[in-house]
Image (cartoon, coloured by chain):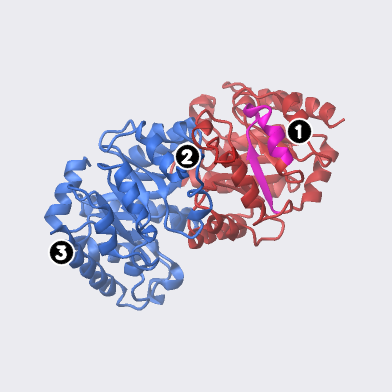
Chain colours: A red, B blue
Amino acid sequence: MTRNELYLNILRKRSFLCVGLDPDPDKMPASLNGDLLRFNKAIIDATADYAIAFKPNLAFYEAQGPVGYKAFEETVRYIREHYPDQFIIADAKRGDIGNTSKAYARSFFEALDVDALTVAPYMGEDSITPFLGYEGKWVIVLALTSNKGSLDFQMIRDSEGTPLYEHVLRKTQQWGSPDNMMFVAGATRGEMLQDVRRLVPDHFLLVPGVGAQGGSLAEVAQYAMNAQCGIIVNSSRGIIHASNGDDFAEAARLKASAMQTEMSQLLG
Amino acid sequence: MTRNELYLNILRKRSFLCVGLDPDPDKMPASLNGDLLRFNKAIIDATADYAIAFKPNLAFYEAQGPVGYKAFEETVRYIREHYPDQFIIADAKRGDIGNTSKAYARSFFEALDVDALTVAPYMGEDSITPFLGYEGKWVIVLALTSNKGSLDFQMIRDSEGTPLYEHVLRKTQQWGSPDNMMFVAGATRGEMLQDVRRLVPDHFLLVPGVGAQGGSLAEVAQYAMNAQCGIIVNSSRGIIHASNGDDFAEAARLKASAMQTEMSQLLG
């Protein structure tokens, strides 16, 4: 999906919501017997009207072994088939040496056909550039994450006061463009989002941490939106596990709908 | 496996060799039809006498989808069953928020029973500590990698001249101990290994980059060995793809044997 197609989807649906498909079997209704795919299909059907993207986090699937991995693949196929306008992000946080990253790129972009993959920047250029050669595909670089531990290394400052996450934003921009690269920037970091936006005025930002992790949607929009929206806001637990009863899909629909209503206002 | 058990294995086999199981179908003999498990079993049988550890890199398996993931699992089971004294490292370079890391820990340490898992430090404490609660299990933190891109961020220095990889070594040490934490330190970084050893005198280092990537075994031993050996040196392509013909296992055996001979001398 191109940047313009993504933007048109946002305008059409008046939403920049990404639903994080991170299913926790302990929070799923007992009637599903831990069936990730059945759970996901119900969530996707219930929320697709209000979202422009879905983001399965691989960890939740890999934790179940090959059965889980298959559920991940089937989830991607289900979205591709039934909701072809959805932007699919494989939240894999990969990052390895060049020939390994090439293998990942083939796996996610060719075999699976997701739109975007999250990557960790620690290993540098050859861990990221192999993902950039695919037309209409995206790499989403972890810059400023929303978890507590993000302060441990991402905020380390060099002799000129520049924190590590700024180095990541500055350097990775030289490898990709606003048409094939996005950045993760957590909602819980408040005004730092302003700093991120200043450094990457045109890139889309994937913003986790709204909802369960405490970030506010209005604040994110205020600090990080640009003229072409420029933000995709993710909510996982807050939507998919809004209820752990048999009404989980309806509860998810209500949460997603409420976020879309707020987003529509913020889009002005 | 405890640190002492690992050290006793090293003394008994006079080897600190880890064989990297990163099978590339394009470099496997045609007669195997890309069967990763058959390839791995032959490599493991041929090299186990000379090695104390095996390290499958998940990317090479995930690139094949569920079939590949199954081959990874079967590989781990095969080593566990036939070579119970081998230290098994899942080279997954994971790193995610706390609840996700917990899912990974369960998957790798409980369901699969590997000894160690590599993790990327960018997301900080809550991405690493969930792996530390398992007796006899290890987390191996990326500190100084051996690839070209490692210079992009790992060498960024703070106002006191301390590079990022030193911050990683210093801070993560506070979370784990030499009994449940190791560090990746690349052989291609020469004298920097000395600096790493000074900062973490007692921790085991996992050293990639000897062989195909150009690092020297003698140099690694000189800079990084400690009184209890303290290093596990990995070689992947240099051993497993020493030949792409039907003699691949015998060629791997010869390469592993040659490395073990050199290691025996370095152990003194």
Reply yes or no: does residue A196 show up in magenta: yes
According to the picture, the residue beneath numbered tag 2 turns out to be B160
**In this figure, which residue is indicated by the disc labeled 1?**
A50
Q: Which residue occupies the foreground of this view, A154 or A68?
A: A154
- The kind of secondary structure element at disc 1 is helix
Horizontal side of residue A49 vs B196, given as left or right: right
Magenta segment, which residues? A180-198
Residue drawn at x 61%, y 57% is A109
Judge left or right: residue B128 versus residue A70.
Answer: left
Where residue B175 appears, x then y in whole percent?
36, 31
Inspect this view and state whether residue B115 appears. no
- Closest to the camera, between mark 2 and mark 3, is 2
Front tag of 1 and 2: 2
Q: Amino acid at mark 1?
A: Tyr
Query: Image point 60% across, 21% down: which residue?
Result: A243
Q: Give the secondary structure at mark 2.
A: loop
| Whether residue B57 is situated above or below residue A50 in the rendered picture | below
Looking at the rendered structure, which numbered label has been put on residue B265? Answer: 3
Q: Quadrant of residue A9?
A: top right
Q: Label 1 vs label 3: CA separation?
A: 66 Å
- Mark 1 residue crowding within 10 angstroms, few (<14) / some (14–19) / many (20+): many
Q: Position of residue B235 (x, y in %)?
A: 33, 62
